[in-house]
Amino acid sequence: MATSENGAPRELKVIGHPLRKVDARAKVTGQTRFADDLTLPRMLHAKLLRSTEAHARIVRIDTSAAEAMPGVRAILTGDVLPEPFGILPVSQDEHTLCIDKVRFVGDPVVAVAAIDEDTAEEAVRRIVVEYEPLKHVASIDDGLAPCSDADRIHDYGTHDNVHKYVNLEFGDVEQSFEEADLVQEDSFYFEGNTHLPMEQHAALAAFDPDGKLTLWSSTQTPHYVHRALAKVLAPLPASHIRVIACPNGGGFGGKSDPFNHEIAVAKLSMITGRPVKICLTREEVFYCHRGRHPVLMWVKTGFKKDGSMTGMHFRSYLDGGAYGSYGVASTFYTGALQTVTYPVPRYKFQGARVFTNKPPCGPKRGHGTPQPRFALEVHLDKVAHRLGLDPAQMRLDHLVPPNSLTANYLRVGSMGLGACIEKVVEGSAWKERYGKLPEGHGLGLACGSYLSGAGLPIYWNRMPHSGVQLKLDRSGGVACFCGSTDIGQGSDSVLAYVVAEVLGIDPFAIRVVTADTDLTPVDLGSYSSRVTLMTGNAALQAAERARELLAQAVAKKLEVPAVRLTFAEGRVFDVEDAERGMTFAEAVQAAEAKFGTIGTVGSYAPPASAGKFKGAGVGPSPAYSYTAIVAETFVDPETGIVEVPRIWCAHDAGKCINPALVIGQIEGGVYMGLGEALMEEMTYRGNRNVVHHHPSMLEYKSPTTHEMCDVISYVIEDPDPNGPFGAKEVGQGPLLPVMPAVANAVFDAVGVRVDEVPVTPEKVLRALQAKARGRDPRTGPTRLPEVAWRPPMRVPPPWEGGTGEALPREGVEVTK
């Protein structure tokens, strides 16, 4: 034990570093033998002991058997790191290791560092934890139910196990229903699912003799990991912490949070003085989760006979899992983007997120918007049938106009949804085949929209969201430094293409350095489809500043006006006399002779949002992408099995910077959406301690090459002035319409509604059986929980004289 007799920290010689201070509460074993034996590997390996209880107090932790094992070098418990952390400032509710209680099966309790993974794993098995079980919360209904203080999962939030309530109203929605020719009311359920990246989470920390910490991690947000490390490891100065995000094999939002294992290996390295590495197993990745929230939804909309809306009331109930994560933002997102596709003159949104004793949910591709998009697009399909309208034409007739403001104060710029719908209608022969195919064969259409980056940072401030530095050298090479993280979407190449386009050089002449908090300017991370637009704009500004310096120097040397110079094909030359010029390398040398070393910076911050009410920070974006999808299905009426042979997808990407990458993102989004539509779900055994039903790739079903459909992709270019060269997002938007398009195609094939995701064979069969018995041919939720909502925040929409500010609140509303 690394303690003196009175329990205070004492000086230890750890791993060859003289007199390193060690926290008394951490157990460090075998220092002298390990330091002297140079034949043993220098790097240590870490493993986490995870809770076997869903909700329980920690009574006792006995690590003595693990301490006695040869090869164990350090054991860490939660009391060593009492400072909480979290991705959002309003939800700092996680600890590196649980201190007083556990909140889901898989919650980390103890960390062990040993000479190899096998030793660390065996040491974890020898640790004894005694728990006092508490009542567990397994569902949305459980989370909304009153409970004692002892049974609360957290001691913060609205009340009981409710994490967040939202109640916003933009105009008099009840009045809009009175003005409608038809009022449609539906309820839907979207089961949670996970990201399933090919690469699991991993991290490596190294604490140097000079007191500097470096963490390499498969993260999407090195800036926020750095922030969490500085908070938890204080008094270690933030300037002594370096985070390097490694190019990782997929993230999809699952690596957007700071995680327990990242902080644990950092502390273990500080304790032992050795590099410490951890690689999570696939089962542990399921416990990290942060995937799609299970969401119960209700929507009521008024329509005119032509399919235009008079108003909409939307409710969502989110199962958030055991911790906050991005959950407050997720709640708002389930109600934010319903208004950016079709005009909604008056709009009311109510949302509730509850804590449950499951792995925490967070941002998965589309963050909070696929669930309500599923509900809205199926809802519209039902209305089209009731009104006798073609679902595609009804949408085409009622699109949000470009350069407009929505009821909830989202500023829409370019809007290519109409062209997207027209393209998939033509490609799928919709007009010739929809509603006319043989029984069991159907077509379904759905649309969607997504952000090109969030309008506000997670921690509100006036600083840029993204920065880029360029260094031009005499050989004609350009180094581009940016904090953004390439998670497989190709963002590094986008930086090179933007800079190369401005400077007129080959992209291969550019060296891109990214995602290193010591070397690169801050970028907030790869999430919300923000990188192309935000880092692209920062790179554009830096490159234009560099071009201006070079143009001044070349103009003087060539004795021509700078405005007559152009940059192309690795040269800078006079547009009126192309022979009069010099190579790009010579231009850099001329500029360096005139100005000194050539380096420029660029940064980007989005325009201010129009809304000024509380909650207006979720939803605004510099630009919105748009997608339309037609899905073709074959449904076996005997088994309910749904096959999707092909999907037509048209996506408005603004302007393609790299068409191959755009097509790849469209196809990847369709693939992921198909899995969510047909089979993927995170389910738990509520009557068995809320144990995960299938935390492995063997049993968690996702499409293989046999289930994957043909994808016919169309890229629609409707450049947006806020994007670099007009570019908008493509990483997340194409996923959103897949699930409702498949559900709508099932209806066209066999005449039944499955108002739940995934659309599994048993649900289809249940609806078919109900249809055969003359009952409602539908599978889906039939009841909603009772909620005592706080009074709504009322914000008059722009066309009713609203300024984006809220009116005073009054009254209490109870709904069922």
Image (cartoon, rainbow, N blue to C red):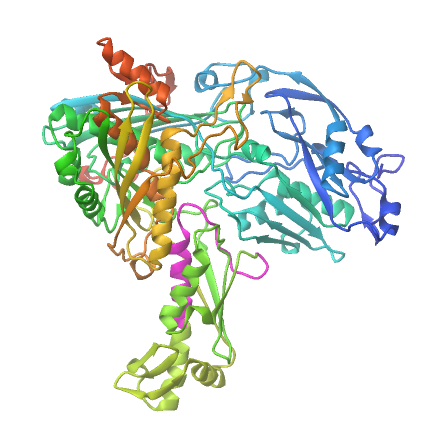
Q: Quadrant of the N terminus?
A: top right
Which quadrant of the view contains residue 745? Answer: top left
Residue 220 falls left or right of residue 412: right
Q: Residue at x 27, y 16 (%)?
A: 768
Q: Left or right: where does residue 630 sit relative to residue 76?
A: left
Identified at 19% across, 48% down, the residue is: 419
Q: Which residues are magenta?
A: 517-545
Nearer to the camera, 8 or 472: 472
Examine the structure image and report whether residue 523 is included in the region drawn in magenta: yes
Report whether 398 appears left or right of 612: left
Q: Position of residue 604 (x, y in %)?
A: 40, 58
Can residue 633 be seen? yes
Q: Can the viewer see residue 179 in this picture?
A: no
Q: Could you say where residue 764 lies in the image, as x and y percent from the top left?
A: 31, 20
Q: Quadrant of residue 466?
A: bottom left
The answer to whether residue 716 is magenta is no
Report the front residue among 437 and 75: 437
